[in-house]
């Protein structure tokens, strides 16, 4: 349930319609997910949501960077990826239980060169990459961006 809640919260944060944690609770409820304000607060911390100014008001958002890879990708890779492996055209990433979808969503948002798609379970995700680049090269590119950030 936590993974699904995180995934929905990330989608909602990208729309810019969350101006309070209570609003996030309401939007989750509309999607059939029951959560408390305290749960949403912990979720926001785990996925890296921050409060940003939007004109005269504020809202919650995922951090962004001037880099095409985005701070949220670097954040989730550093905080949630425990082990990385590359083989052929597949990268396998291991996370703590319940965090694979958060990492997958960050990879999808980053539009990384050579990444064709991502499939996530509970604590493992598979990143399919272009045969021409290969998994080792794409993983090295991702890790280089992490070091630069």
Image: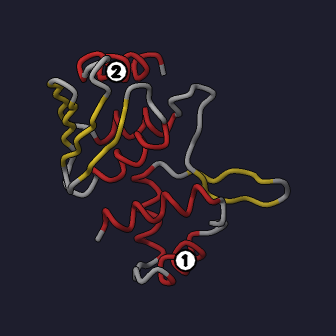
31 or 112: which is nearer to us?
112
Residue at 58%, 25% in the rendered image: 67
Write down the residue under mark 1.
27
Q: CA distance from mark 2 to mark 1?
A: 35 Å
Residue 128 appears at what percent x and percent y? 27, 35
Q: What is the quadrant of the N terminus in the image?
A: bottom left
62 or 56: which is nearer to us?
62
Task: Determine whether, in the image, residue 149 is placed left or right of residue 55.
Answer: left
- Mark 2 neighbour class, 10 Å CA radius: few under 14, some 14 to 19, many 20 or more: some
Circle 1 SS class:
helix
105 or 115: which is nearer to us?
115
Residue 88 appears at what percent x and percent y? 16, 23
Residue 3: quadrant of the picture: bottom left
Write down the residue under mark 2.
143
Residue at 73%, 59% in the rendered image: 58
Q: Eyeballing the image, is 29 above or below 114?
A: below
**Residue farthest to the front, as pictured:** 132
**Residue farthest to the right, as pictured:** 56
Residue at 42%, 37% in the rendered image: 75
Q: Are marks 2 and 1 in contact (CB under 8 Å)?
A: no
Task: Determine whether, in the image, residue 97 is placed left or right of residue 36.
Answer: left
Residue 46 appears at what percent x and percent y? 39, 53
Q: Eyeballing the image, is 128 above or below 57?
A: above
Residue 36 appears at what percent x and percent y? 44, 79
């Amino acid at each position: 349930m936590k993974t699904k809640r995180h995934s929905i919260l990330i989608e909602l944060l990208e729309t810019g319609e969350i101006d309070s944690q209570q609003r996030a609770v309401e939007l989750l409820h509309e999607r059939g997910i029951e959560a408390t304000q305290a749960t949403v607060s912990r979720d926001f911390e785990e996925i890296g949501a921050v409060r940003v100014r939007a004109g005269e008001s504020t809202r919650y958002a995922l951090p962004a960077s001037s880099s095409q890879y985005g701070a949220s990708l670097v954040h989730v890779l550093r905080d949630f990826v425990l082990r990385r492996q590359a083989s052929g055209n597949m990268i396998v990433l291991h996370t703590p239980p319940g965090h694979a979808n958060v990492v997958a969503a960050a990879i999808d948002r980053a539009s990384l060169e050579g990444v064709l798609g991502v499939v996530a379970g509970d604590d493992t995700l598979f990143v399919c990459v272009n045969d021409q680049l290969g998994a080792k090269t794409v993983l090295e590119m991702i890790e280089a961006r992490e070091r630069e950030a």
